[in-house]
C-alpha cells in the first residue's frame, strides 16, 4: 500500500528547471504552489504533505512503529497539477511503498484552509488503497 502511494506521489513531484533568457531581465516568479503543511486521517493512517517552495515531504504514519516519509522535488502547472520525482525515502516498520526515482502526479485545488488532492498517478500505478489514502481533503496545519 505504501509503495503504490509513494509511487503515485513521485510522478507528481518531478520538477522542470526554468532559466530566464539571457537578453531579458529576470522577473519575479509568480507561483501557484500549494505551500504549507496539509494533513488528513483515513482510518488508522495519518497523511501529511509539507510543501515548501523548493521541495516537499509526504509522510504516512500508522503508528510510531510504522511510517513512510517521501522527499521529492516538484513542480506545478497553471491548471492545478502537482508533479514530481522522489529524491529520498525513509521507511520504518515496512518494506512497502515507492522507491527513489519514482515519478508521481496529482490534481489539487486550494480553498482557504483546505486542499483537495485528486487524480493520483505514478510511474508505478497506485493501488486503490493508495488512492483512498492519498486522495481527499487535507486541512492546513499550523507551521
Image (spheres, helix red, strand yellow):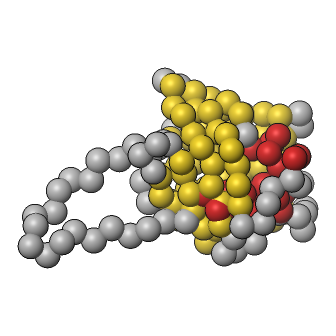
In this view of the protein, which residue sits in the foreground, 112 or 79?
Answer: 79
Q: From where the camera sits, is residue 63 visible?
A: no
Which image quarter: residue 125? bottom right
Q: Position of residue 94 (x, y in %)?
A: 90, 63
Left or right, residue 74 beside residue 19: right
Residue 88 vertical placement versus 66 (above, below): below
Image quadrant holding the N terminus, namely bottom right
Q: Is residue 59 visible?
A: yes
User: Residue at 74% of width from left, 44% of height from top?
Assistant: 134
Q: Nearer the viewer, residue 114 or 67?
A: 114
Location of residue 143 in the rendering, given as x and y in whole percent from the top left corner: 51, 38
Give the camera-side residue of 5 and 38.
5
Q: Residue, x 81% and y 56% (percent of image)?
A: 126
Where residue 85 sits: x, y (%)? 60, 67
For the residue pair 101 and 77, the one nearer the viewer reads as: 77
> In the image, residue 112 lies at what x, y percent?
49, 24
- Of all residues, the one furthest to the top in this rendering is 112
Is the residue 125 above or below the residue 64 in the image? below
| Image point (54%, 34%), residue name | 109
Task: Please tell me which residue is depicted at 54% across the width and 51% down the height of the picture.
Answer: 82
The mark tally for this picture is 0
Amino acid at each position: 500500500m505504501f509503495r503504490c502511494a509513494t509511487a503515485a506521489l513521485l510522478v507528481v513531484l518531478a520538477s522542470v528547471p526554468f532559466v530566464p533568457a539571457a537578453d531579458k531581465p529576470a522577473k519575479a516568479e509568480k507561483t501557484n504552489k500549494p505551500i504549507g503543511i496539509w494533513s488528513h486521517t483515513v482510518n488508522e493512517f495519518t497523511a501529511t504533505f509539507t510543501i515548501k517552495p523548493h521541495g516537499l515531504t509526504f509522510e504516512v504514519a500508522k503508528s510510531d512503529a510504522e511510517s513512510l516519509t517521501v522527499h521529492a522535488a516538484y513542480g506545478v502547472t497553471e491548471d492545478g497539477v502537482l508533479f514530481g520525482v522522489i529524491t529520498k525515502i525513509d521507511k520504518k516498520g515496512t518494506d512497502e511503498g515507492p522507491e527513489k526515482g519514482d515519478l508521481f502526479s496529482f490534481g489539487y485545488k486550494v480553498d482557504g484552509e483546505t486542499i483537495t488532492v485528486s487524480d493520483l498517478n505514478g510511474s508505478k500505478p497506485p493501488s486503490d488503497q493508495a488512492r483512498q489514502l492519498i486522495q481527499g481533503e487535507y486541512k492546513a496545519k499550523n507551521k
